[in-house]
Image (tube, rainbow, N blue to C red):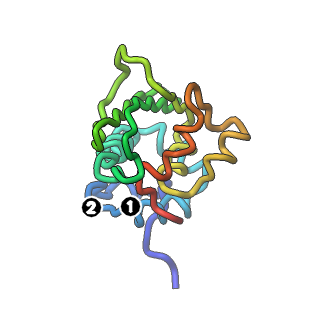
């Protein structure tokens, strides 16, 4: 029996209400979509909607127990046209996400292309492999970057 879930590259994906897609469903969507399809999708008008939904959910996916007493600013740079920047501020057991680049100095900056970002946040990509193959660039605290899987509840694909 065919899987009824559209892949990210299908026309059906454009009609999805991203707010109703669970993290597990999103993970399944990314898993069955090729890198080329993801890159094509993220060149279109859906890119802003997809990124806004992902970053909008980060506060809900935040795991205060995993963060402990951490105080840090994490900058996410998603390459493409245009480059999109979001910042995640963690302090006092809480997480706040803001679009754009602030004047504050981040503790770590993560830079990657759209497909790698989608794979990373959906649990479909190995951050270590992405780093070793230079598909994920980390500037600053590499230890903090490696702890993100404890700080955020990332779906398991």
Mark 1 crowd level (few <14, some 14–19, many ≥20, 10 Å Cα) = some
Tell me how far mark 1 sits from mark 2, CA to CA. Answer: 10 Å
Task: Relative to 1, say whether 62 is above or below.
Answer: above
Q: Secondary structure at mark 2?
A: helix
Residue 13 versus residue 136 in the image, above or below: below
User: How far from the left and from the top, in percent, is residue 100?
Assistant: 35, 24
The numbered dot on residue 20 is 2
Query: Which residue occupies the extreme front position in the image?
Result: 69
Query: Closer to the camera, 27 or 2?
Result: 27
Give the label on residue 23, or none.
1
In the picture provided, is 49 more to the left or to the right than 134? left
The residue shown at (47%, 50%) is: 121
User: Image quarter for residue 88?
Assistant: top left
Q: Is residue 128 above or below residue 84?
A: below
| Viewer-nearest residue: 72 or 82 | 72
Front residue of this view, candidates 64 and 41: 64
Residue 1 place in picture, x, y as percent:
52, 85
Q: Position of residue 64 (x, y in %)?
A: 33, 50
> Which residue is the extreme one toward the top?
103
Q: What percent of the width, then of the height, locates residue 143?
A: 58, 38
């Amino acid at each position: 029996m065919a899987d009824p879930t559209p892949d990210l590259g299908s026309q059906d994906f454009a009609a999805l209400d991203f707010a109703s897609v669970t993290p597990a469903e999103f993970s399944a969507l990314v898993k069955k979509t090729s890198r080329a399809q993801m890159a094509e999708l993220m060149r279109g008008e859906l890119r802003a909607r997809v990124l806004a939904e992902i970053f909008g959910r980060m506060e809900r996916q935040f795991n205060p127990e995993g963060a402990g007493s951490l105080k840090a600013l994490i900058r996410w740079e998603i390459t493409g046209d245009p480059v999109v920047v979001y910042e995640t501020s963690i302090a006092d057991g809480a997480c706040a996400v803001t679009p754009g680049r602030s004047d504050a100095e981040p503790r770590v900056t993560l830079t990657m292309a759209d497909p790698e970002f989608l794979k990373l946040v959906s649990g479909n990509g190995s951050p270590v492999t992405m780093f070793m193959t230079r598909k994920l660039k980390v500037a600053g605290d590499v230890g903090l970057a490696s702890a993100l899987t404890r700080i955020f509840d990332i779906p398991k694909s």
